[in-house]
Image (cartoon, rainbow, N blue to C red):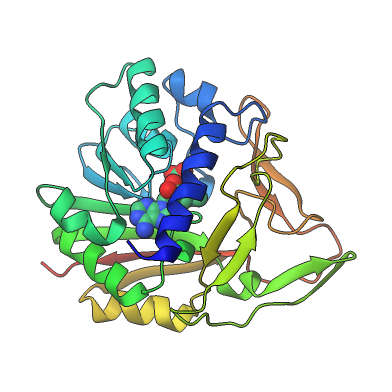
């Protein structure tokens, strides 16, 4: 494992332990344990009816979306490289009464070897591809998991939003629009983005910003056919401090954020569906 990936895994292991015992409400743990879905509106609209579908959920973190997919009638398997994330996901599956949902510990680039069979849907959302240096390789793995006629669903932060940061209340360009594979953006986060004050021990993490053309090009070069591409004005997390709640679930938990009233609008996220030709 290269040094960037090893640092990210240690960082995600720490975050997974915090997120599995989250008290901030950022993760819909209670809803999922009660048999409900915590999927975001963009995801629900993007995947449609998943009843009976075999789903590979890549970078599944603590498994809450994986279990939500099961609650919606799919047969999902979750994959993540963090041992703590996979352990938490298995614990949630048992507490949610879903021992049929399995979780696999593996690097996403090794997903084809780690998962058996072909899938109707490969599901990848919110904070996944920014941890990966090579999008072409990722897209080829996603395509290799699909049966002919199967679909990839991807929902992510928009690269146009990732290059910006909020400094003293002003949104300004901070990062280059493309990150070289061997020179990722290095960050040290003392705490997680949930707002939980508990410290992270392994603070260092490495990320990549991938241009939209690289993401779309990777998907097309992997032999998939683009079925749908959309841009959205919401995100499931607060990318900039001035963002405000946009949607809440039935428990009053904030599930999406938007730019404040009066701010110049730009896309915060995108989603796409791409199909493997039959
Ligand atoms: C922000 S979380 C993704 C959230 C996810 N969409 C969900 O359902 O909650 C990012 C996840 O990617 C995982 N990850 C990062 N790099 C990875 C890699 N190379 N292979 C597998 N998992 C990876 C981390 O362990 C973490 O759980």
Q: Position of residue 69 (x, y in %)?
A: 35, 37
Q: Quadrant of the N terminus?
A: bottom left
- Seen in the image, is 260 located left or right of residue 132? right
Residue 3 vertical placement versus 256 (above, below): below
Q: Position of residue 259 (x, y in %)?
A: 76, 59
- Seen in the image, is 181 located left or right of residue 157? left
Residue at 61% x, 75% y is 160
Residue 44 showing in the rendered view? no
Q: Position of residue 193 (x, y in %)?
A: 65, 46
Q: How many marks on residues?
A: 0
- Viewer-proximal residue among 71 and 192: 192
Residue at 41% x, 29% y is 88
Q: Position of residue 19 (x, y in %)?
A: 55, 34
Residue extending farthest to the right is 168
Among the 4 quarters of the image, the one containing residue 101: top left
Residue at 56% x, 73% y is 159
- Viewer-proximal residue among 31 and 101: 101
Residue 183 vertical placement versus 8 (above, below): below
- Seen in the image, is 146 located left or right of residue 40? left
Residue 90 vertical placement versus 215 (above, below): above
Residue 145 showing in the rendered view? yes
Among the 4 quarters of the image, the one containing residue 60: top left
Residue at 46% x, 17% y is 34
- Seen in the image, is 226 located left or right of residue 161? left
Q: Quadrant of the C terminus?
A: bottom left
């Amino acid at each position: 494992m290269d040094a960037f990936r090893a640092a990210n895994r240690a960082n995600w292991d720490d975050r997974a332990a915090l997120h599995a015992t989250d008290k901030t409400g950022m993760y819909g743990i209670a809803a999922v344990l009660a048999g409900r879905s915590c999927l975001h509106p963009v995801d629900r609209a993007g995947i449609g009816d998943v009843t009976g579908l075999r789903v590979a959920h890549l970078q599944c973190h603590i498994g809450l979306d994986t279990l939500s997919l099961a609650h919606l009638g799919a047969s999902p398997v979750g994959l993540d490289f963090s041992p703590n994330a996979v352990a938490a996901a298995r614990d949630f599956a048992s507490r949610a009464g879903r021992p049929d949902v399995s979780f696999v510990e593996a690097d996403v680039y090794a997903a084809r070897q780690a998962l058996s069979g072909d899938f109707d849907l490969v599901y990848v959302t919110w904070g996944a591809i920014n941890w990966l240096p090579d999008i072409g390789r990722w897209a080829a793995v996603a395509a290799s998991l699909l049966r002919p006629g199967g679909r990839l669903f991807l929902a992510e932060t928009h690269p146009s939003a990732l290059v910006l940061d909020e400094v003293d209340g002003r949104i300004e360009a901070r990062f280059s629009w493309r990150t070289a594979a061997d020179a990722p953006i290095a960050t040290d986060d003392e705490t997680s983005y949930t707002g939980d004050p508990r410290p992270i021990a392994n603070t260092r993490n490495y990320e990549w910003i991938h241009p939209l053309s690289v993401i779309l090009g990777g998907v097309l070069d992997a032999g998939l056919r683009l079925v749908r591409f959309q841009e959205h004005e919401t995100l499931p997390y607060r990318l900039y401090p001035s963002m405000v709640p946009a949607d809440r679930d039935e428990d009053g938990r904030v599930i999406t954020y938007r730019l404040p009233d009066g701010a110049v609008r730009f896309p915060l996220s995108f989603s796409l569906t791409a199909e493997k030709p039959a």
